[in-house]
Image: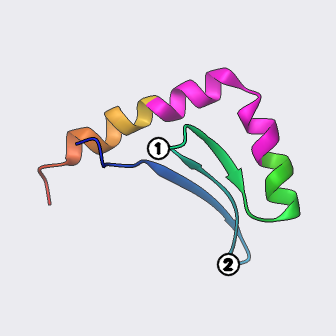
Amino acid sequence: LKDIQYIRSYYYNKLELFRFSSSLGRFVGYTEYGVKQAEYWNNNPSQIAVLRAQRETYCLNNVGID
């Protein structure tokens, strides 16, 4: 179960701007705008904690379904 990842991506116009990855535990930006947004969201510890908890809440409870 350690290899399960929770990924939350943000897109605009079919282009991925930034994403949160539970394996990294932070946001990563892929465009100039996305890098700025990732820095903003990474400076919010409460939001990071919520997204880290989503891995356990969402992913681990649904492992046996598929």
Mark 1: amino acid? Ser
Let me know if residue 44 is in the magenta part: yes
Looking at the image, which is closer to me, 61 or 29?
Answer: 29
Confirm or deny contact between disc 2 and disc 1 (CB under 8 A).
no
**In the displayed structure, does residue 4 sit left or right of residue 8?**
left
- Check residue 14 in the rendering and tell me which mark sits there, or answer none: 2
Q: Secondary structure at mark 1?
A: loop
**In the displayed structure, does residue 57 sit left or right of residue 43?**
left
Residue 18 in the image, given as x and y percentages of width and height: 69, 57
- Check residue 23 in the rendering and tell me which mark sits there, or answer none: 1
Q: How far is mark 2 from mark 1, CA to CA?
A: 24 Å
State the extent of the magenta-drawn residues as a range. 38-52
By secondary structure, the bulk of the magenta-drawn segment is best described as helix
Question: In the current view of this chain or complex, which residue is farthest to the bottom?
Answer: 14
User: Which badge, 2 or 1, comes first in the chain's sequence?
Assistant: 2
Residue 28 in the image, given as x and y percentages of width and height: 68, 51
**In the displayed structure, does residue 34 sit left or right of residue 4?**
right
